[in-house]
Image: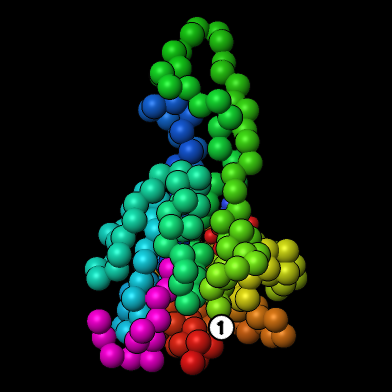
Amino acid sequence: LIDGPLKGQHVLVTSGPTHEPIDPVRYIANRSSGAQGTAIAEALMRLGAEVTFVTGPASVPAPLGARVIRVETADQMLRAVEKALPVDAAVFAAAVADWRVAGASNSKIKKQAGKLPTLEFAENPDILARVSQMSEGRPKLVVGFAAETDDVIANATAKRVRKGCDWIVANDVRPETGIMGGQENKVTVVKADSAEDWPRMSKTDVSDRLAAEIAAALA
Ligand code: C5P
């Protein structure tokens, strides 16, 4: 472990999408490369933190030096997160599917000419909200993300209150920004009494700045 301002602090990071099975060969998922979550874990470790990294099936490699726990579904992610607690701080960068398929089939759904399957959904647990609202053993700092396309500050502010987390990092995911899956990010960081617009910068720079703010908040 590196000697830095986060030495001795244990931080949990969730990252990547979740995959929710329809049957053994099909799933629904959110779009997420895992790049921002991985960059945050790496930045936290550069400041000396011990990182537990709970990740869905991401397309970028998991951060070296973190304790990596791989999951597929939101339910599995919730259980892995609960197992990793207590931690000093938690950053929820995963793009968790809001719904899973109710009554997912254990055998492959057969294609039948002229007959279309219908899917029914069930609500997934909101992992960020659960951890934010823990009455005992809550991390000292809980950071959530919000992918927004418009009214970024208003939506992120409402989300922060609704979920009960301390900070929301809102990113502008309008397709024309090229942020989804790209190297850069443009974020607004909403706290209890501020909303800071950060300039467009690399996901690494966003992560370094966020890690520095997390270190300051835990100090
Ligand atoms: O409600 P929304 O999906 O916009 O919230 C995004 C934030 O909540 C992210 O930090 C995401 O990781 C977290 N989240 C979660 N569990 C869910 C849905 C979202 O932890 N089921």
Residue type of the residue flagged with mark 1: Trp
Residue 208 vertical position relative to residue 152 in the rendered view, above or below? below
Q: Residue furthest top?
A: 113
* Residue 27 point in image, percent of width and height: 45, 34
Q: Is-magenta flag for residue 91?
A: no
Horizontal side of 180 relative to 48 (left or right) equals right
Q: Which residue is mark 1?
A: 198
Q: Residue furthest front?
A: 136
What residue is drawn where x is 61% and y is 82%? 197
Mark 1 closeness class: few <14, some 14–19, many ≥20 residues within 10 Å: few
Kindly tell me whether residue 170 is visible in this rendering. Answer: no
In the image, which residues are magenta?
A: 1-12
Kindly tell me whether residue 84 is visible in this rendering. Answer: yes
What residue is drawn where x is 28% and y is 90%? 3
Q: How many marks are shown on the rendered structure?
A: 1
What residue is drawn where x is 50% and y is 87%? 218
Residue 22 vertical position relative to residue 184 in the rendered view, above or below? above
What residue is drawn where x is 58% and y is 63%? 131
* Residue 155 point in image, percent of width and height: 72, 66
Instruction: Decide if ligand 1 comes within 8 Å of the CB at mark 1.
Output: no
Residue 104 vertical position relative to residue 219 in the rendered view, above or below? above
Q: How is the image coloured?
A: rainbow
Residue 101 vertical position relative to residue 206 in the rendered view, above or below? above
Ligand 1 is in which quadrant of the figure? bottom right
Locate the N terminus and report the quarter of the image it occupies: bottom left
* Residue 95 point in image, percent of width and height: 51, 55
* Residue 183 point in image, percent of width and height: 39, 69
Horizontal side of 179 relative to 156 (left or right) equals left
Judged from the image, the secondary structure of the residue bearing numbered disc 1 is loop
* Magenta stretch secondary structure, dominant: loop
Q: Quadrant of residue 12?
A: bottom left
